[in-house]
Amino acid sequence: MLYIEPNAGVEPVVKVIQQARHSVEINAWLIDDRAIINAIRSDARRGVNVQVIAESLPQGVPYMRVVREYQLLAAAGAQLRWAPPRFTHRFAQDHAKYIVDDNGKGPALISTANFTYAGFHKNRDYLWISHNPTVARVLAKVFQADWNRRHAGAVARSVPNLVISPGGEKALIEVIEQPGPIDMQSMEFGYIPRINYVFERKGKLARIIVPADLSAYDRGNLAPLIHHGVQVRFMNKPYPHAKMLVGNRLAFIGSQNISWVSLHHNREVGIILRGRAVKMLRQQFDRDWKTSRPMQK
């Protein structure tokens, strides 16, 4: 089921955590929302094993905020491990945002939102709650591999509609290349030659929403797309933190930004959607498009 932020609020995340019977596994780039911390505390008190993987060096985040996050989680009764070293250095991050109940036997949540107050009250973000047991089991295996400092290996590629990075570029290109129009919301737009190329080929069939405070570097990457007819607009409120693609048949939401590091080095998790979710995402994009202002050539 699809949830759109900030409309849905934090309740869908809290509910997934509360539904856990024996264990809940949480991977978060940032996690300090009070309602989520309280749900973790409640789970721990009733004997649920709460495991959290968090990024120890989130880019641009003050160190003391990370320390406070650790203190909150420890006080709530969670077991916390920092992300594996291969995802915690200058050129890689554990940027994934997902939750799995009962080692894959319960629901799984995949999020574009960080588990923070802004994620559920200030930003345009999306959540997907899956009751597909195959999706949940694969995410649980990926989590346990990262928890135990092992490589996830082939299991990360075993479900076609799960997009797990490192290695997410091909799946995003397949979504962009589907016949017909394509819309995207992204807080970044780095230089990914093949992605830039497929957007240029779409031309006027492509629309992109980015934040009004987009960097000069990312604006430069968008300039050739605009030259080829791609329509780009800036959005102020809510802040477009989402990473979303939507066409006529397929859509994508996830933690993956349009950047080389995000797609090829980070731990990221996303999902390709079909059916009613596609219609909901296109409708939300259309509403956001109307309130955004054009980026000039």
Image (cartoon, rainbow, N blue to C red):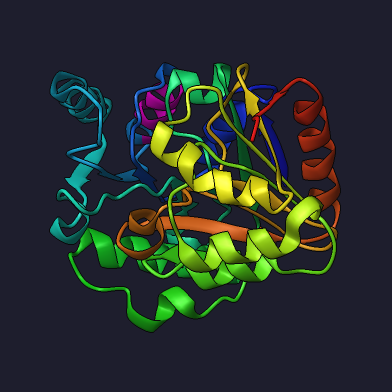
Left or right of 288, for residue 16: left
Q: Quadrant of residue 44?
A: top left
User: Can I make out residue 137 in this image?
Assistant: no
Left or right of 137, for residue 181: right
**Region in magenta:** 35-43
| Residue nearer the viewer, 82 or 264 | 264
**Residue 33 position in % (x across, y down):** 41, 21
| Residue nearer the viewer, 10 or 226 | 226
Name the residue rendered at 37%, 58% in the picture: 260
| Residue nearer the viewer, 98 or 16 | 98
**Residue 114 position in % (x across, y down):** 44, 33
**Residue 102 position in % (x across, y down):** 46, 56
Name the residue rendered at 75%, 27% in the picture: 288
Q: Quadrant of residue 283?
A: top right
Name the residue rendered at 66%, 45% in the picture: 226
Q: Compared with residue 120, is residue 58 higher up or lower down, i.e. above or below?
A: below
Q: Compared with residue 152, is residue 184 higher up or lower down, i.e. above or below?
A: above
Name the residue rendered at 61%, 22% in the picture: 9
Q: Quadrant of the C terminus?
A: top right
